[in-house]
Image: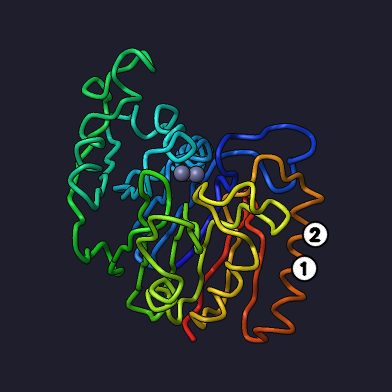
Amino acid sequence: MRVRFFGVRGSVPTPGPSTVRYGGNSVCVEVRLADDTRIILDAGTGLRELGKALAAEDHRGTLHMFITHAHWDHIMGLPFFGPLYEKHGHVVLHPVTEASGRRMRNPILFDGEHFPVRFADLPATIETRDAYGSHRIGSVTVTHIHLNHPGGAVGFRLDDEDGTSLCYLTDNELHAPTGQVTTPDDLARFAAGASLIIHDAQYLPSDMPAKRGWGHSVVDDVLSLARDAGAARLALHHHDPDRDDAALDAIAASSAEWARTHAPGLYPIVAREGMTIDLDSR
Ligand SMILES: [Zn+2]
Ligand SMILES: [Zn+2]
């Protein structure tokens, strides 16, 4: 599996001189399987850049899209995704609940009011395939888990035949004060032995308690989850819009130090727009 980050920012895009190194586009990750099957995780503004990258390599295959939830930062890129405007474009949306299926079959962004083009007028072929249980795409099996987030969100695990595995878990508050649907232990089991966990790490301890209940995790809790899951790598993702490049550098340094002390087998990184990670089986 090859994982490419096209957007790593949470809540709202943050262009500007203080975020150029880690990037300001909201969340979007592409996963490429060994047989060239493409899976897209979230459709934030990074999706626009992904569309351009696909055009540059003249990719014409099917694109499988999983969206964690319908908050703006996770869907804002959809109207600007080039393949939707190509006759040969083929995008498959994979809802995991009936409610998300209804939203995907009739996306608010394409209602003629929020954007001038209506969904039915897009030239591409757009399919919706329910993925309520475990789901096979190319060489991977995709499973999902419900996360602790206002309004709900869904995390995904991709297990490839070659033994590599990826967990995409955002947006999630590991220690939610109310309405916890998944405990940290549940998530550690779900993510057990993952080659890579990508997890929402929007907050620092200094943001608490003001942002308790907002549906995002503190970096330290995410590091503990990755250790408990026995993951090989961890990408801290969905960065706070107020976190500039220097602040993210500091999180990278403190996370590496934490891992040296508490989880010597774990390799944590701070996700950065444009970053590519090749997963290898252990
Ligand atoms: Zn978000
Ligand atoms: Zn959200």
Q: Splitting the image into 4 quarters, where does residue 180 fall?
A: bottom left
Q: Secondary structure at mark 1?
A: helix
Q: Which mark is residue 254?
A: 1
Looking at the rendered image, the quarter that the N terminus falls into is bottom left
Q: Residues within 10 Å of mark 2 (few under 14, many from 20)?
A: few
Q: Splitting the image into 4 quarters, where does residue 100 fall?
A: top left
Front-most of residues 273 and 67? 67
Whether the residues at callouts 2 and 1 have beta carbons within 8 Å, the answer is yes
What kind of residue is marked 2?
Ala
Front-most of residues 222 and 206? 206
The reply, left or right, for residue 119 in relation to residue 261 is: left
What kind of residue is marked 1?
Ser
Q: Which residue has dot 2 on it?
A: 250
In the image, residue 56 lies at what x, y percent?
A: 50, 40
Look at the picture and state if 227 lies above or below 244.
below
Q: Which mark is residue 83?
A: none
Q: Splitting the image into 4 quarters, where does residue 241 fall?
A: top right
In the image, residue 261 lies at what x, y percent?
A: 74, 84
- Say which residue appears at 43% left-offset and 58% top-offset: 31
Q: Secondary structure at mark 2?
A: helix
Look at the picture and state if 33 lies above or below 9.
below
Q: CA distance from mark 2 to mark 1?
A: 6 Å
- Say which residue appears at 49% left-offset and 35% top-offset: 48
The reply, left or right, for residue 219 in relation to residue 225 is: right
